[in-house]
Image (tube, helix red, strand yellow):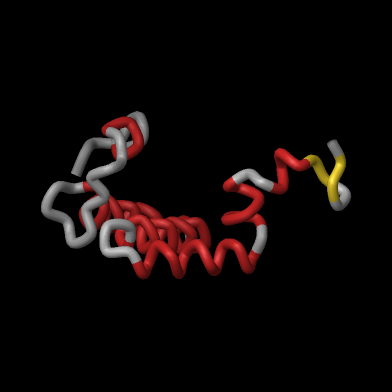
Amino acid sequence: GEHGGGHLGEETSFRWQCVEQPIGKLLFRRFLEGEPGLAAAGALWAELEAYERCEEAERGAVAAALRSRFFTVGGAQHCGFLSAAATAPPTGEAPP
């Protein structure tokens, strides 16, 4: 039903609470940063947002740095919980 101008399902979703709501996003990011097993996920999220804001000419180098840091076994903050499909280079691009 309706609650506060929206559907209850939307108000309890992860996307609404932790991505679309600034305070929820801040609190969730702080939670990730404070948990040793999740800190890499928080750092990856921040770096992906920075990637979205960078100039087109810089994206290739930034993407390579992200793959090396987060997607490569032995990388500084390897996110081993990500699937192979999530870490695969875009179609037509060679792996690092």
**44 relative position to 65: left or right:** right
- Residue 96 in percent (x, y) is at 19, 44
Give above or below for 31 relative to 18: below
- Residue 57 in percent (x, y) is at 42, 58
Residue at 27% across, 33% down:
84
Closer to the camera in the image, 10 or 50: 10
Visible residue check, residue 58: no
Residue at 23% across, 45% down:
80
Closer to the camera in the image, 57 or 50: 50
Residue 19 lies in what quarter of the image?
A: bottom right
Visible residue check, residue 91: yes
The number of numbered badges drawn on the structure is 0
Which residue lies most toward the left here? 74
Closer to the camera in the image, 22 or 2: 2
**52 relative position to 91: left or right:** right
Tell me the quadrant of the picture where the N terminus can be found: top right
**34 relative position to 71: left or right:** right
Give above or below for 72 relative to 87: below
Closer to the camera in the image, 93 or 3: 3
Residue 41 lies in what quarter of the image?
A: bottom left
Residue at 63% across, 68% down:
23
- Residue 15 in percent (x, y) is at 60, 47
Residue at 32% across, 31% down:
85
- Residue 17 in percent (x, y) is at 63, 54
